[in-house]
Image: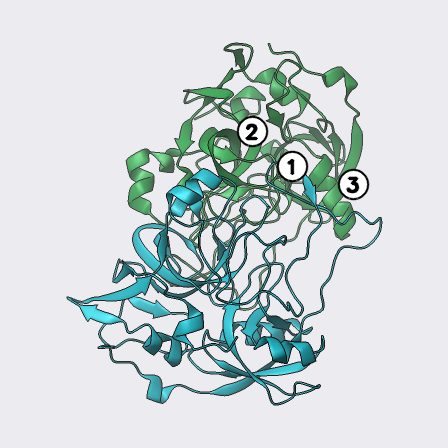
Amino acid sequence: MNVTTNSDKLVSLSVMGQIATPSFPGLPAEPYRLASDGTPFLLPTYGSIVYNVSVGDSAFGWLADCIHPSVSINLADDNGNRGLRVLSCIGNTAVVMSGDAKGSKGVVTGKSGRFSEHVIVHFPKAVREKMAIGDKIVVRAKGIGMQLAEHEDIYLKGCSPELLESLKPQGKEGKLEIPVVASVPPHLLGAGAGLDSEGGSVHIQTTDKTEVQKAGLDKLKLGDIVALENYDSRYSHGFLRGAVSIGVIGQGDSPRAGYGPGITVFMTSGEGGIVPKITEGVNLKSLLKLEA
Amino acid sequence: MLRTNADQLVEIAAVGQLSQPSFRRPEYIPDNDGHARVLPGMHGMLYNIRVGDPAFFWAGDHVEPGASIAHKNLENDFALHYLTCIGNRAVVTSGEAKGAEGVVTGEHARILVDFDPEVGEFLCPGDSIQIRAKGRGLMLSDYPHIQLKKCSPELIESLPLEAVNDFKIRVPVTMELPIEAMGSGAELNSEYVDQDLMTGDKALMAELGLDQMRLGDLVAIRNADHRYGRSYRTSAVSIALCIHGDSVMTGHGPGILTLMTCEEDAIEWQIDKDANIANYLNIRELV
């Protein structure tokens, strides 16, 4: 890494969430959602403890709708939940504060957007076995306010100093080279456009499987680092030629129109100051040394 | 004229009240460059902006032409949203303007109703406006593979639609929108409100002439499947209506409401600068 940050000045603070309870709409008991071709489906979706899906696994193929790997946390109080979502940074340490898994440590790996609004935390599978819905988890939040001295056009969003360092970004001729496994063209970016870029996600839309395959996105794994082409995430998310954003695949594919694997954006330049370098295997599992 | 099943449709009343403008605290919204802005545009009665006026230009955000109505009870409000169709008649049922008639021209977070400007002067937030809702279930009898959304029979009858062959129809539109610039609203089902054209790239708007869009314009989007949500699908086509004005916010811009959509290439279009509902529904002369 040959960039200078202000990480010595960052404030580190506690922010709490609780393991989210899964929910479905009530009576008259029509639990179905619609796939992009109009067929109804009933599948597990975001929230809760997911025992068998982890960062490093495929983002595709699960019989689920935008599944969050490992553990999802939120807070019933809206403002408190907003604090949790904005302040938690990818790579921050999370500690279980109540229940049988008390004292276990995990790592923040994603945030989900409008209608779910969770923070996604990786815990080893053995820890998940001991957890209960409602357990209190404290994120030791650090990263908001971080800037790159030589790259004023680059905005960091929920990026921990640990994540930045692990990516070994290389400054070259005023631009910053970031390794990514793939680059998502703007016509395949769906839900999340126009929404909050301080705590949500943008989804790859996977209705057209051929286009997804053509763009080399069909083999993406949860935790993969990707680029968003012509996408400006400085003040909410939107199309802008020349802009580049970088994010992590936080949640899995979806049958719904406009949806698919979710990307938590943690870096953006409105002026093309980020150069994505296609590199195999750039994934949070190895970057942050996540325990299986 | 293309055949429809309009004679089978039910006509049912739905109601909303003229909305009161409101702001979140603090009142600022960030524009594309991160500057804090305070702008009017949504809710209430816009005295000086109607269907047929420019969608860009205004010192406003998401301007909603005419009267914006909503129901305070969430489920009643959803009924108003799901039952109301573009071109439906509206009648003021309380207040100083009681008895005045208008026409539905859009659906944003509120239902948008055009009234003659002199009616607007008598409207007060809270006044009830009743919609004679008709259009749910409407189909083009010979083109069942083309879905209609929120089209009243009056709107469909007013459009100069042409049969191309047994599979395709032709529709007049003012312009084609690039799908990579379709933004906010992708997270919602397409039975609810609109999807914004993302206008942060001002140079692109000018290059393609999209900044000439007017409120009420018909537009086409290639590779847009809006049947059960809004997503990219090669060879799908959607025809839509510009219902609200531009926005300063990233990922936002004029609101594009789906009127017709098909999975396969069953809709052609021809560019016609008069393809605006102000014209088709005889609301006003286009400027």
- Disc number lying in front (3 or 1): 1
Question: Which residue has dot 2 on it?
Answer: B261
Q: Quadrant of the C terminus of chain B?
A: top left
Question: Which residue has dot 3 on it?
Answer: B94
Q: Residues within 10 Å of mark 3 (few under 14, many from 20)?
A: some
Q: What is the secondary structure assignment of the residue under circle 1?
A: loop
- Pick the residue in front: A212 or B13: A212
Instruction: Give the residue type that dot 1 points to.
Output: Gly
Mark 2 and mark 3 on one chain: yes
- How far, Cα to Cα, is label 3 from label 1? 40 Å
Q: Taking B58 as reference, is A121 above or below it?
A: below
- Whether residue A235 sits left or right of residue B187 in the image: it is left
- Disc number lying in front (1 or 2): 1
Mark 3 and mark 1 on one chain: no
- How far, Cα to Cα, is label 1 from label 2? 13 Å
Q: Quadrant of the N terminus of chain B?
A: top right
The percent coordinates of residue A105 (x first, y second) are 55, 84
Number of callouts in the render? 3
- Whether residue B95 sits left or right of residue A195 in the image: it is right
Question: Which residue has dot 1 on it?
Answer: A38
From this viewpoint, is residue A256 visible? Answer: yes
At x 58%, y 29%, the residue is B259
Q: Taking A111 as reference, is B193 above or below it?
A: above
At x 47%, y 67%, the residue is A198
Chain painted green: B
